[in-house]
Each structure stands twice: as C-alpha cells, then as structure tokens.
Amino acid sequence: MLFTSFDFIIFITLLFVMYYTVPKKYQWKLLLAFSYIFYFIAGPKFLFYILLTTGSTYVSGIKIGKLYEDQSLYLKANKELSREEKKAFKAKVKKRAWKWILGCLLLNFGILFFIKYINFTIANINWFIDRLNDRETLSFIDIALPLGISFYTFQTMGYIIDVYRGKYPPEKNFGKLALFVSFFPQLIQGPISRFDDLAKTLFRENSFNYNEFSFGLQRILWGYFKKLVIADRILVAVQTLIGDTAMYDGAYVFVLMVFYTVQLYCDFTGGIDITIGIAQILGIKVQENFIRPAFSKNIAEFWRRWHISLGTWFKEYLFYPLSIWKPMLNFSRFARSKFGDSIGKKLPVFLSAFVVWFITGAWHGASWNFIVWGLLNYIFLMGSEELKPFYSWFHSKFDVQGTLGFKLFQIARTNLLVSSIRLLDCYRDVPGTFKMVGSFFTKNNFNIFVDGSLLEIGLTSADYWVITGGLLLVLVVALIGRKGSVRELMAAKPVIVRRTAFYLLIMSILIFGAYGVGYESSQFIYNQF
Amino acid sequence: MKTLLSILKDLHPEIDFETHEQLIDKGVLDSFDIVTIAAEIDNEYGVSIPADAIVPENFNSAKALYALIERLEEEE
Amino acid sequence: MKKIISIFLTIAVGLGGFFSVQRLLVPKYTKGIVEGTLIEEYYPEAKNHDVIIIGDCEVYENISPITMWEEYGITSFIRGSAQQLIWQSYYLLEETLKYEKPEVVVFNVLALKYDQPQKEEYNRLTLDGMKFSATKLKAVNASMMPDENVLSYIFPLFRYHSRWSEVNSEDFENFFGKRQMFHNGYYMRADVKPVETVPSGRILPDYDFGDNAYKYLNMMVELCEENDIELVLIKAPSLYPYWYDEWEQQMEDYSRKKGLKYINYLELVDEIDLDFAVDTYDAGLHLNVTGAEKVAMHLGKVLSEEFDIEDRRSNQQIAAIWEKKVEFYNEMKKNQYEELEQYGYIKSLKGE
C-alpha cells in the first residue's frame, strides 16, 4: 500500500477514528493489528520473516534480562563476596548473555544478508569463476525482499544490543515488541527508532489532542506536498534521463544530478513528514530524521542532518564498538611503534570508518554502485579530516570564516559533492557513471539549457513552474524553520490566515500533485532498501 | 587528569577543556575525536572504555571523562 | 456563537472552493470529443419516451429519433456513449427505468464482444455523465480497470486535476451550465466519407462471447421482463468493427431461445437503401445523418407495426416538445451542411 494511494488514506482515516473510539487500553493493540494488516497486504508470505525476527529477539531479550535480574539478586544476597568473586560472577553472566545476543544477531543479520545479498554475492563469485575460465557458475536464487526488512532488522537489533548493554530491561510483552518492530508508518522508510525513545509514547494511552492533531495533519500535508507536487512530478524527467544514457549525456548529467537531488530530497523528507505526522495525530512521537540537510556546510555535518537515525545507528552500534575493540586498539599500538604516533593514532578511526561506510553503502542496495558510493563518502570525510591543517592555514590567511558568502560557498560545495556521487545511484553502474560524469566535461552541449531541450524530457513549462514554485516554498519553510517551528509560527496567526493557508496547501496538493491517471504511481525511493 | 587534558588539548588546542561543560552537546567533539580519545585513554591509562559508556554524559566535560576513567579503573 | 459561525464558514468556504475547482477542471465536452456530453443530456428531458435505445456508438450515430418521430410519431431517446460496455448499458437502463417506463428497449449487440473493462478514458465518457446514485456506483464498480479508484468517480477532481494547465475559455463559459449540444442522445454528423475498402476481420482465437458479457445480457432480458418491457436486439449496419458470422449465429440462437426480436441491419443494407458511398462519415465505421435516417425509417416501422408503439403526434403536449426538437435538428443539419460547403468540414464540432 503506497503512502500516496487512496487506499492508504482510507486506511489511516479508519485507524484514526477507531484509535480514539476504542477503550484506551486497546489503543496499542489496535496499532499492532493495523500494522500487521498493512504488512499482510504487502505480501502474506513476508509475515514469516518479521515474525521470526520479532520472536527471536523477544526470546533473546527475555533471556538476557533474566540473566541480569538473577545477577543483581545474587549479588544482593551475597554481599560478603569479594570484589574478585563479584567480577568473576559478572563475567560469567556476561558470557552467557553474549551467547544469546550473538545468536540473535547472527540469525537476524543472517536473514537480512541472505535475502538481500545472496544474489549479489553469487554474482561476484561468478565473476571470479568466469575469470578462472570455469563454466560452472552458480545459479541465482529467486527470493523476494520483504517490505522494510533493512529498516526493521536494524531497529530490532538496536533494541537487543541496548538490552545486552543493560541500557533498559527487555520488553516482556510480546505484542508490544511486535508493535515496535512492525509500527507501519515507519516500516517502509524509517526512521530507525530506538526502543526507549519510541516506547514512551507508542504504548501509552493517548487522548485526542486538537493541537497535536492539527500539527500532525499539517505535517502530513506538507509531506504529501513535497512528495506529490515536486518529487513525483520531477520523477518523469529523472527516469527519462536515466533511461537513455546514449542520448542524455554531457550537460544532461548535470541536469540529472540536480533533478535527482530534488526528487530524493522531496521524496524522502516528504515521506518522513508523513510518517511523523501520522504518528503525531495518534499522539506518538517519532524522532526527526532530517534537520534541513541541504544547509550543511560539510559532508560530516550533512551526515549528521540527513537520515539521522541511520547515521546514529551505525555510530553507536558499529563505529564505536569497532574502533575501541581490543584488537583494534592493539593494532593501533602496534602501528604507533612501527609508523609513529600520528599514523597509529588515526588507524582505528580510518579502519572502522572504512568498514562503516562500506556497510552503509551496501545497506542502501546490494550492488557495487552503492558500495562505491559509500566509500566515496568515506574518502570525502577522511579527506576533509586530513585537510584540517590546510583549512586552518587558509583561514589564518584569509578572514572569510563566518561570512555569508563563504557559508554559501561551503553549502554549495557540500551539495555538489553529495549530489554528484548520488549519480551512482541513478545509473546503477560504476564505470558507466564515471563515463557519464566524464562526458559532462567533454561533450560541450550546454546549449540544452537555452534551446528548449529541457522541455523534451517529460516536463512541460507548466511543470517547471510548479516545481520551481514548490521548491521556493520548501526553501522558505526551511529558512524560517531555522529559527523555530513553522507550525507554531502559523498557529500564532489569525484564524483566517491559518485556514486559508491550510486550504491552499490542500488544494495545491489536489490540483498540482502528480497522482492518478497519467502519472505512474511511484514508490517511495527508500522502499527498496 | 593532566594526561587527559593533554590528550584533549592535542585534538583541539583552541578549547579550554578545564571549564568546558558541553563538549558533545555543542559539537566540539565529533565521533572521530571520541574514538581517538578512547584509544588514547587505553594507551595512557590502560583502561578500555566500553561502547555503552560512549554517551554524552561521559564526554561532555574533561571532569566527567576523568570520573569515567576512575570508575573503570576501579572495576578493572 | 461566533465560533459556530466561524466553523460553518470555514467548512462552507472549503467545500465551495473544492467543488468550484472541480467544476472548473472537469472536461466540458462542448468541443472536440462532443459525444462526452450525451449521457448527461438525458436528465433535463421530459421523461415519457415509448422507446429507449441503448448501446455504443452504433446507436447514437446510426439512428435518428427525430425521423422516427416525424414518420411514426414514436418518442424515443438514445442512451449511448462511446464504447459503451454492456454492463454500462445495463446500469444505464436500470437508471432510466427509475425515471420512466418505456414500451420497448432496443439494444445494439456489438458490445457483447467486450467481456472485460477496456479503457479508462472510455469508461469516463460513459460514467462521468451519470448522476450520482447507487446505480452509478454499481456501473463504476463493474467498469473500473485494475488501477482505477472509485473515489475518482465520486470526486472527478482526483481524475482531472492535471487539466489545470489546459484550462481555457470553454471551461469558464460552461462553468455554471452548458448549452444543449444534441437532442435525444443522437450525435448528428452530416459529412460524408465513403467506404473504399472493407477490411476483413482478423482471425480470433475464440468466437464465443464472454460469460461476463452474457451475464449482463441475461440481466437485461430479466430486467425488461420484470418491467413488462419488450426487448429488441439489433446489430447496426456499421461495416466494422467486423461482425463475424460466428457472432451472428450466437445472437440468432440467443434471440430465438429468449423469444426476442433480433434485427441485423448488415443484412438489410439493400432493403433500407443504405449507400456506403454517401451514408457514412468515416468510411463505414459510423453512419452520417442520411444513413441514420434510413435506419430510423426501418426501425420506426418495425416498432410501430410489430410492437404497436402509439403515434403521439396527436398529443398536443408531446407534440409541442417535439416540435422544438425537430426545429433544433433541422437547424443543426442546415448549419452542418453550410459549414461543409464553406469550410469543407464541420467547424462547430471542432470548436474553432
């Protein structure tokens, strides 16, 4: 069920009405039922996977929780134990907990790996077999990717790691854990919520609150505006440009880069707006996933503001543990003695970041273009880390830091970098992408910007006007948003202004939205991940 | 404490670590800094910081960080 | 109190805005595809017809109700539209019977060739003109293609919103109401394009009409029986879409089994003096006005002689209404011939 389908809107309306009419203690159960209906509609056979993940995580969590509980009871009952004895006991418990979590992680990441990456792995193995002139290549496995598996696996594994780390006790109610795993507004494209954060509002009894409802509804509409009016409209041109690389090279590559950035931004942030808005009208708080990423001044900042929940996940559950892992630190010590302090010190960071970005790339899709994309991010990040001395030198010579012009330059540079490497995502072919980018410098067909060629790629001048107008509105809202909530600002305006704005937003979605006959219904881009 | 301050100073000479109380919240230390600090502490003090100890409360000030080191030394 | 007024105003303005925009954006069909207006033109009519004709373009272009009135005093109305599928015909009949009870219903059997919904655009031409009712919803439900949604029939803005960039003077001129384009559901064309070659029918994998199509034909027969109405099946004399012998056999068998009158005008071309050099405007696909009058002459005769349809010309009230229709008809015919003479094509239908 697409967010932009009539069915989905009916689904949400039905849920909303029932949510505030059933007795409050049944609210979360209703959410669970609707989430499973949502999942069932996507494909009944996928229920098996999500239930397996939920079940295995539930059992592991309970077991680990029990171990920790017994431990504190034992320690309390045996206060006379020496420190060493206590430590030994704790270590024993930790070891047993480790078995549970290791099993849980292996099983669930194993499922994800198998379903998502098995054919990619086979393809790569076949490449080698081919090089060895062996005819016996492996055959691919026909397997469908369950809806949202990358998202719910990460979210659930975050939960079990937190339980293992003793951050919070495990959820004892299987239904509640199942709702956390399957909560449908965020199932398709995130955010990857943390259990302790989401649980605060997900399971509580929520009363209807007009302000929350109105803010949530505005957020949903804003999401639909970005998605339907801008993203889905420009999608036609993006598909045209990707579809015929022989025809659309040179300056078109630049056009594609810009259009795809616009489309991805509006599609993804719009989708998250809808997710957060739906949760909000139900009285549930889902964490933000974006903070105006287009205003980032460098790549590191960009990744702190774009798809935040994914970045946080990787940082907390992969980057930190990996970079302060004993063998890693030992290796660092070894490197210091061999190559000197400055290199040895950086090694853990460089190595861990490499792993993180390799996996981040692969998380986005099982193909080399995504992995190369991830590694290019890594190179940019490490590059700017290494260039820090140069930056300080530059700023000591030229006093431009903090000036508007320099800030705009930084923003433009960052956007250019992140957008250009996204072309890998468009062409889905690593050498092909580099060839296309190369053609930009050699082809010299910049006259397409003035000779009307841009009206031949699926967009009319009316479409360009709508897209431009829509983007201006998005820009204005983002600029205002730096100072505070746009919705609160609106709420302070006279009622006539508010209602007019509300109607204009609805009508512009209904009229200018790219939906219905004549528009291919398009999935949210992040669905496929 | 002195060793710790020199580790920190090495990373960001421009910051006064003795008084700063919001190193994470204000974005002075990024994830690379944190990992470098953890490695340095391991090197200098011989205590390893577990991943679950990497939370803002422990890294927001030099004082908090030193308290963490002491706590960990205790447990070793 | 103030709050109530404010809420009331908000809702009123919201609904008003929505329906105004919707009204502006739905196609008006007064130019170009003028046949899109045929279905809705039924509603303002005086509903006391003795004969209702239902079917696709093979009825609304091939039979002239005015001729049947002038020659036999038969009052008739054509409820037909482009590629009107058989379930649409059925529900249009069901709807019509809510307004009036004719003596005879005439149905053109070509639509049996389609067993499943065909094209969203054609669905629209038939269904958008229907007034909102349970019958309309049933018709929509039977007609929708897999990716269509019933909401877009209830609120056509969802379908036509992308017309915002094509809005023109036609949309504003017809915002509050349209002028009547045709009378009695007959789409008049006076131009001529003779038949040169008749393409023969492709070989089909299966010549049996589908179960779904038969289901609605059966329902139509039952509906007429329940309402004590005589059902007449016809096949209009259009040369193509090709009418296969196998199809003809099925219709002959069916009408015999059900005891229905069945007239295949393809077999009566000589008898009714139809000349495909002059009586068609698109080389045999549809008849022009001279052809439609010839078919009407014959059909009227059958209806009055075999089905005893009363001659209403002596009824003052009805005659007064039809007098205007005849006038409109003759005026339109005259105009079309003049335009043909002057421009070589019918300018008023092109909407220039």
Image (cartoon, rainbow, N blue to C red):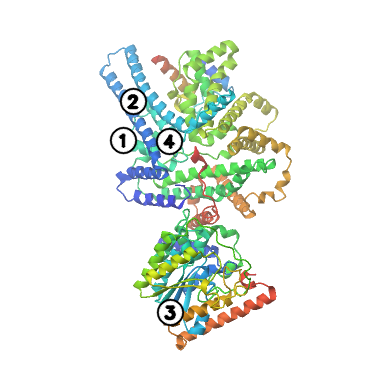
Which of discs 2 and 3 lies nearer the camera? The answer is 3
Q: Position of residue C108 (x, y in %)?
A: 47, 69
Image side of residue B48 versus residue A391, left or right: left
The number of numbered badges drawn on the structure is 4
Residue A255 visible in rendering: yes
Q: CA distance from mark 1 to mark 2?
A: 15 Å
**Residue A64, which numbered label?**
2
User: Which numbered mark, 3 or 4, is in the foreground of this view?
Assistant: 3
Mark 1 / mark 2, whichever is N-terminal? 2
Q: Are marks 3 and 4 on the same chain?
A: no
Q: Amino acid at mark 2?
A: Ile
Q: Are marks 2 and 3 in contact (CB under 8 Å)?
A: no
Confirm or deny contact between disc 2 and disc 4 (CB under 8 A). no
The span from disc 1 to disc 4 (Cα, nearest Å) is 18 Å
Q: Nearer the viewer, mark 2 or mark 4?
A: 4
How many residues crowd around disc 3 within 10 Å: few (fewer than 14), some, or many (20 or more)? many
